[in-house]
Image (cartoon, rainbow, N blue to C red):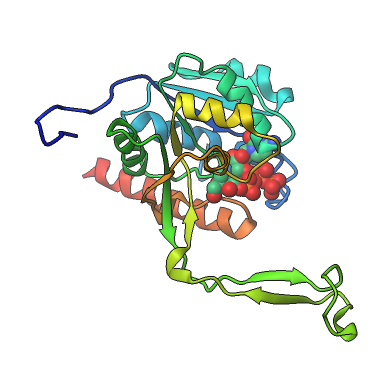
Amino acid sequence: MTTETGVNTARSGRVVALVPAAGRGERLGMNMPKAFVDVAGQTMIARAVRGLLASGVVDHVVVVVPSEMLESVADRLPDRVTVAAGGAERTDSVCAGLDQARDADFVLVHDAARALTPPELIRRVVDALRAGRRAVVPVLPVSDTVKEVEDVTVAAEGHPAGDAEGHVCVVHTPDRTRLRAVQTPQGFDASVLHAAYDAAADVATDDAGLVERIGETVTCVDGDPLAFKITTPLDLLLASTLAAQDSDAHERGAAR
Ligand SMILES: Nc1ccn([C@@H]2O[C@H](COP(=O)(O)OP(=O)(O)OP(=O)(O)O)[C@@H](O)[C@H]2O)c(=O)n1
Ligand SMILES: C[C@](O)(CO)[C@H](O)COP(=O)(O)O
């Protein structure tokens, strides 16, 4: 980035990516930690790490795995990748990774479950950090109408008595043009992420949520549909199909 006076303000510094991969994968229902599930010949965690390294903008990766898998993973790590033991909640796992990223100037936090994230998206996040943004999230417009709802069995007084049978009712329809679905990697100036985690009183569903709570501005860059989170069996089917198509296309290209 260049200012009006011609001074280059691009920020240099070491980029460390944390890959929380210690989740149980309850919604996927494969009876194994989700990050170790195969997607067309490679585990989710291997795909996520390869994408980060292929971006060319990440210096080091810390994968955060269930504690019982620490030793087996440590035995077969590629260069520039280290491992930490995760915790009960995603925020605990990110905290464990952050402890191993004390030398970072910029930190990316990237779900192993977003295994097909294109390297271009990772570069967009890092470019925004280097241009001076302190917290960056990739986002997509929301295509469904989203409702805020309330369980009327636990609602405040004023609802009709007949509603108190476990109905869920709509209380509000937010303006969809102001909503975005948020992906990863989320990128941060390291000092900002450390401050957010130091101040965190409870868990949040994403890292930028903790950064918002300390009053920092979070900047949006374009996300990518391929960075979807593999959460359910349908997501896994989609990811496996896309990844298999991609490797078929590579093989056809190599055979030409
Ligand atoms: N205690 C946890 C929980 C989640 N994660 C990681 O955070 C990312 C996003 O979480 P999610 O997709 O919800 O994974 P799970 O927690 O495994 O899924 P579920 O809620 O269905 O069990 C995943 O890469 C997951 O491995 C983690 O490192 N530690
Ligand atoms: C961090 C995240 O991927 C941003 O969309 C998401 O909030 C993780 O949520 P999950 O319930 O842990 O999958």
Q: Quadrant of residue 58?
A: top left
Q: Is residue 125 left or right of residue 192?
A: left
* Image vertical order of residue 52 relative to residue 218, above or below: above
> How far across and down, in percent of the image, does residue 198 sit?
62, 26
Q: Nearer the viewer, residue 161 or 221?
A: 161
Percent position (x, y) of residue 66? 70, 28
94 and 193: which one is in front? 193
Residue 153 x/y as whole percent: 86, 72
User: Residue, x 27% and y 34% (percent of image)?
Assistant: 131
For residue 171, say whether it is visible: yes
User: Is 184 on the left or on the right of 125, as rendered?
Assistant: right
Left or right? Give the position of 51 relative to 175: left
**Taking the image as four quarters, which one is ligand 1 found in?**
top right
**Residue at the location (43% across, 42% down)?**
217
The residue sitting at 68% across, 30% down in the picture is 92
Q: Does 122 sit above or below residue 236? A: above
The N terminus sits in image quarter: top left
Give the quarter of the figure containing the C terminus: top left
